């Protein structure tokens, strides 16, 4: 199975559709709630819901998910029954397979209950009609319009005695989302130096600045103080989400003092100095925080 332990838990929704084609006389019986084995639609509804809930047992590499809602809908036409399955869950992975399994088993049940009277039944193609809740929801929020930069704050890295891996990890994550990465700067743990660099990046028109390091409780950890001198409007939800996500993996995440906020149209986010801390922090909010930028340009929220 694919490891999804790093992904945040979000609301996931998917809708799949299929159909069963039949003779007009068979469709009339379905419409009347009749059939050789009884009314097929209520039975197919229950079967589809059960299949959606049991998808992980039917499909080997599907993750078990706790479904919060499953709905099976039917539309009886002149010579067909159209079937739709909607699945909803608050989970780390999507529910597309649950929706598809529900729709297909409902169709198979309709087929089974009508086959004694109709030898020409045909199950149509199954397709995913809609899905929401994954990182693809934010795929267009960067789209080459966002310029980003990384500031690594570390005495030892600046002195050349420590190799930093957190900065390249941040830059790679931004580049993968279409952010134009302007570069990685390495600075010592000096809040005045960090403040000047942040102001320089803002003046240069950089939209997104991630810092790495200096968010802890050590005597030289002063990145948060430097960022607060520059930030005009804090966005506490970003840092809160990162701490909660990290705390579920290690209690040490609670020791981070990281902050985030806007200065003009530039978003500044302070991250821990460890590569693992950076990855887990970004897992919590990336790429969702890219929605800041269409909002900063005057755009609204996406439709629910």
Image: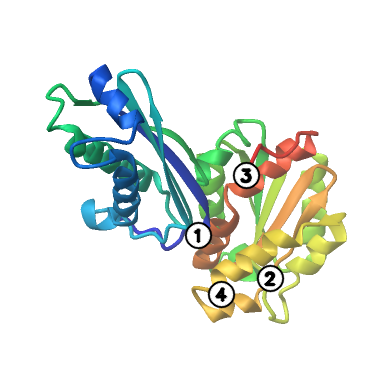
> What residue is pinned by disc 1?
165
Of helix, strand and loop, which one carries label 4? helix
**Is residue 109 shown above or below 242?**
above
Q: Would residue 190 be visible to someone looking at this image?
A: no
Q: CA distance from mark 2 to mark 3?
A: 21 Å
> What residue is pinned by disc 4?
247
**Is residue 66 shown above or below 43?**
below
Q: Residue at x 23, y 35 (%)?
A: 35
Quadrant assignment, res 190? bottom right
> What residue is pinned by disc 2?
215
Colour scheme in use: rainbow
Does residue 26 appear left or right of residue 82 in this picture?
left
Q: CA distance from mark 4 to mark 1?
A: 22 Å
| Residue 203: % across, % down | 83, 41
> For mark 3, does the 10 Å Cα neighbourhood hold few (<14), some (14 to 19), or many (20 or more) residues?
few
> What residue is pinned by disc 3?
183
* Label 4 or label 1, whichever comes before in sequence order: 1
Q: Would residue 202 be visible to someone looking at this image?
A: yes
Q: CA distance from mark 2 to mark 4?
A: 15 Å
* Label 3 or label 4, whichever comes before in sequence order: 3
Q: CA distance from mark 1 to mark 2?
A: 17 Å
Of helix, strand and loop, which one carries label 2? loop
Image depth: mark 1 or mark 2 in front: 2
| Residue 31: % across, % down | 35, 29
Q: Residue at x 68, y 70 (%)?
A: 214
**Is residue 188 shown above or below 300?**
below
* Label 1 or label 3, whichever comes before in sequence order: 1
Quadrant assignment, res 177? top right
| Residue 143: % across, % down | 60, 31
Image depth: mark 3 or mark 4 in front: 4
* Label 2 or label 3, whichever comes before in sequence order: 3
């Amino acid at each position: 199975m694919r490891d999804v332990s790093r992904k945040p838990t979000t609301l996931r929704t998917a809708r799949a559709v299929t159909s069963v084609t039949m003779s007009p006389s068979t469709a009339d019986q379905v419409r009347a709630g009749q059939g050789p084995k009884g009314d097929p639609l209520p039975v197919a509804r229950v079967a589809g819901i059960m299949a959606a809930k049991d998808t992980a047992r039917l499909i080997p590499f599907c993750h078990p998910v706790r479904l919060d809602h499953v709905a099976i809908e039917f539309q009886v036409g002149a010579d067909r029954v159209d079937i739709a399955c909607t699945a909803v869950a608050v989970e780390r992975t999507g529910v597309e397979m649950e929706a598809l399994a529900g729709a297909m088993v409902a169709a198979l049940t309709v087929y089974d209950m009508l086959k004694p009277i109709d030898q020409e039944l045909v199950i149509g193609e199954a397709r995913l009609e809609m899905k929401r809740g994954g990182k693809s929801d934010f795929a267009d929020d960067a789209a080459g319009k966002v310029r980003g930069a990384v500031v690594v704050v570390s005495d030892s890295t600046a002195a050349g005695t420590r190799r930093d891996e957190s900065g390249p990890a941040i830059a790679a994550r931004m580049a993968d989302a279409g952010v134009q990465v302007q570069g990685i700067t390495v600075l010592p743990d000096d809040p005045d130096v960090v403040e000047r660099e942040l102001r320089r990046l803002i003046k240069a028109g950089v939209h997104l600045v991630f810092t790495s390091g200096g968010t802890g409780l050590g005597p030289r950890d002063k990145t948060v103080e430097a960022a607060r001198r520059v930030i005009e409007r804090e966005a506490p939800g970003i840092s809160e989400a990162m701490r909660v996500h990290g705390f579920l993996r290690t209690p040490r995440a609670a020791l981070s003092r990281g902050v985030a906020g806007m200065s003009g149209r530039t978003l500044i986010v302070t991250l821990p100095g460890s590569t693992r801390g950076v990855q887990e922090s970004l897992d919590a909010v990336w790429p969702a925080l890219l929605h800041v930028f269409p909002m900063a340009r005057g755009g609204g929220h996406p439709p629910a």
